[in-house]
Image (cartoon, grey):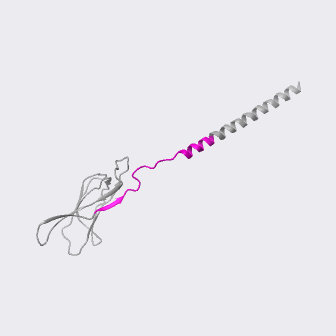
Amino acid sequence: VTDDIPEGTKYVAGSMKAYVDGKEIEAEIEELEDGAKSGNLTWKVESLKVGEVLEVTYQVKVLTVKEGLKVDEITNTAEVEHTGKATGKKIKEPTNEIENPVNNPEPPDVDTSDINVLMYVIIFLVAIIGIVVGVMFINKKKKETRKSSNKK
């Protein structure tokens, strides 16, 4: 079984596994370096009995937009190569195609209007407090000046 790393992803090293009828088996594998964004992964299994099911798995991480994600859906099809028992000829066949939507290919827009309104309210309140404190200070000075002029 050969599979190309799907566009928009990077490979997670050490994640290749092979199973026959749900039980993990030892398979000869050719894997890529951690973080590879392209290339082939290969599993080689000597033989399967009639009716046995081979499942191969691996993990990838979906790229971010900054890392170059340019798709909104990840699709993947592997290729199976086997020798026909009756004919002895090598046969290559594609597997089923798997499609996975990418939830957030673009970073979300941030609405800052609420933050701006809050900042204006805070600035307004600070200004009012400053005015009130200033008026209180002026009134206190006026009273002190009147008291000192009354004592003379």
Question: Is residue 32 rendered to the left or right of residue 63?
Answer: left
The answer to whether residue 81 is magenta is no
Part of the protein shown in magenta:
97-122
In the figure, 42 relative to 122: above or below? Answer: below
Q: Is residue 116 magenta?
A: yes
Can you say which quadrant of the picture contains the C terminus? top right
**Which residue is situated farthest in the bottom direction here?**
51
**Residue sitting at x 32%, y 59%:** 59
Label total for image = 0
Instruction: Answer left or right for 133 relative to 16.
Output: right
Q: Position of residue 2 (x, y in %)?
A: 22, 60
Q: Residue at x 79, y 33 (%)?
A: 140
Split into 4 quadrants, where in the image is the N terminus? bottom left
Q: Residue 15 appears in which quarter of the rendering?
A: bottom left
Q: Position of residue 81 (x, y in %)?
A: 18, 64
Q: Tell me the quarter of the picture where residue 75 sits.
A: bottom left
- Apparent side of residue 16 relative to residue 143 in the rendered image (left or right): left
x%, y% of residue 49?
Answer: 20, 74
Residue extending furthest top? Answer: 152
Q: Residue at coordinates 28% horizontally, 62% vertically from top-left?
A: 97
